[in-house]
Amino acid sequence: MMTPRIAAYSAALDFAARQVASLIEKHPDFFPIYTTGGKWHHGGELWTDWTGGFLAGMMWQFHLREISRGLVAPQESQWRKRAEHYSKLLEHRQHDRNVHDLGFIFLSTYLPWYELTKRPDLHAVLVQAGRTLAMRFMEKGHYLRSFVAPESLFIDIMMNVPIIFYAAKESGDDNLLRIASDHCRTTRNYLVRPDGSTAHEGLFDLETGRFLRQTTHQGLRGDSAWARGLAWSLYGYSKCYALTGDEMWLQVAERNADYWVNHLPADHVPYWDFDADLSLLPPWGAQKDSSAGTIAASGLFDLAQQTKSPDKAKKYQATALSTLDALVQPEYLATHTPGWEGILKHGVYHTAKNLGVDESVMWGEYFFVEALMKGLAAGVPS
C-alpha cells in the first residue's frame, strides 16, 4: 500500500538519484565534500579527504533499490556500472595511512560490492583497509590516532573502527580484534560522557598514554555536545555491536541515542551543537545540521532492531521516522531550490573554518539515502 510517507520517501530517493546522476555527468570522476552556494565544484579547502566512499556508496544504494524493486537485471544496471567504476577509483586508498577514515571509504563501497558478488579480490581490499587503519593504533593510550596529531583521538573514528572488527572477523586476526576493542573502550571511557553526550576530541600524553582533556575542532566547546559527533558515536557503537555481539557497545549506543532523542528540537532535526545558544544567529547559534540528523536516523533504525527494550525500539524508530519526515520537506530537500546541486540543504561541515556551513555535505547525502532505504525496509508505518 502506497501511504503518503512511503510516497514521500520514494520521491526523495528518486530526486537523490537524479541529483547524483547530474553531478557525475557534469563532473565525472570527481569526489566532492561540500557545496558552496549549492554548487559542488569550487576551490574551497578540503581539510581532509575522507568522503569519496559516500558518493560511490549512494550509487550502490540506488542499485540495491533497483534490485529490491525488481527493476533491472544486475548486468544491465547503469547504477551498478557507475558504482563499480567509482569504487574502483578508491581502491588504492586501502593502503592510505594518512587518514582515519578508511571505514567511511570502504564499508559503503567495497562491502556491498563484495556482498553481492563474493569476489575474493574485493574481500581482500576490505581486509587490507582494516589492517591499514589498525596501523594508527597508539599502544600508550590504547586508541587509534586521528589525522591531525598522534596525541589526538576523534569521536569520528567510531564510524571507522568497524572495518577493523570486520577485518579481524574475516581473517581471524586476534590482534586486530584487540586493537578495535581497546579503541572502543578508550573512546567510551574518555569521550562518551555519563549522560550520553560526546566530546569531539580527546588529547593524550604521548609519553605515558595518560588522558589529558576533552577538546574540539568542530563543536562549540570542548565540553559541548557537537551534534554530528554524537551521531557518529551512536551509529558507530551500534555497528560495532552488530559485528561483535558485545553488549558493552550496545549499551554505549543506547546511552548516546537516549541523549539524542531527549534533546532534539520539535522537528527532530538537530542544531549543529546541542549546547549552541539558539538566541544567536547562525552559524554559531541557531544553525541546523541536517547531516547529523541523517546519520542518527540511520543509526536509530539499526538500534531499534538491536535493543532488548520494546519501548526503546519504538522510540528509536519513531524518532528516525520523524527526522526523515522533516527532511523530505522542501525546507531541507532541495526539490524546490533552483540550481541547487545537492540533495539536502542545511548541512554543516566545519563551523570554525567556515567550510560547508548551511550547505549540502556528501555524508549527509549518503546517510539520507541509507536512512530512507532503511525506513522503506522497515515498512514506514503511517
Image: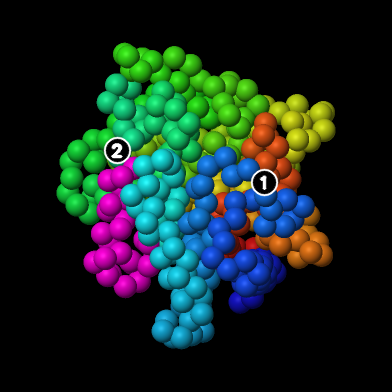
Mark 1 and mark 2: span between their CA atoms? Answer: 30 Å
Dot 1 falls on a residue whose secondary structure is: loop
- Label 2 packing within 10 angstroms: few (<14), some (14-19), many (20+): some
The residue at 17%/49% (across/down) is 172
In the image, residue 40 sits, relative to residue 3, either above or below, namely above
Query: Is residue 334 shown left or right of residue 223?
Result: right
In the image, residue 300 sits, relative to residue 56, either above or below, namely above
In the image, residue 28 sits, relative to residue 212, either above or below, namely below
Q: Is residue 42 magenta?
A: no
User: Label 2 near label 1: C-beta < 8 Å?
Assistant: no
Can I make out residue 58 in this image?
no
Q: What residue type is labelled 1?
A: Gly
> The N terminus is located in which quarter?
bottom right
For the residue pair 70 and 17, the one nearer the viewer reads as: 17
Residue 347 locus on image (x, y percent) = 68, 47
Dot 2 falls on a residue whose secondary structure is: loop
Residue 135 locus on image (x, y percent) = 29, 38
| Disc number placed over residue 44 in the picture, else none | 1
Front position among marks 1 and 2: 1
For the residue pair 236 and 253, the one nearer the viewer reads as: 236
For the residue pair 121 and 280, the one nearer the viewer reads as: 121
**Magenta segment main secondary structure:** helix
- Label 1 packing within 10 angstroms: few (<14), some (14-19), many (20+): few
The residue at 67%/41% (across/down) is 355
Counting labels gives 2
Q: Name the residue under label 2.
A: 135
Query: Is residue 343 shown left or right of residue 80?
Result: right
The residue at 53%/30% (across/down) is 200
Residue 201 locus on image (x, y percent) = 50, 27
The part of the chain drawn in magenta is 110-133
> The C terminus is located in which quarter?
bottom right
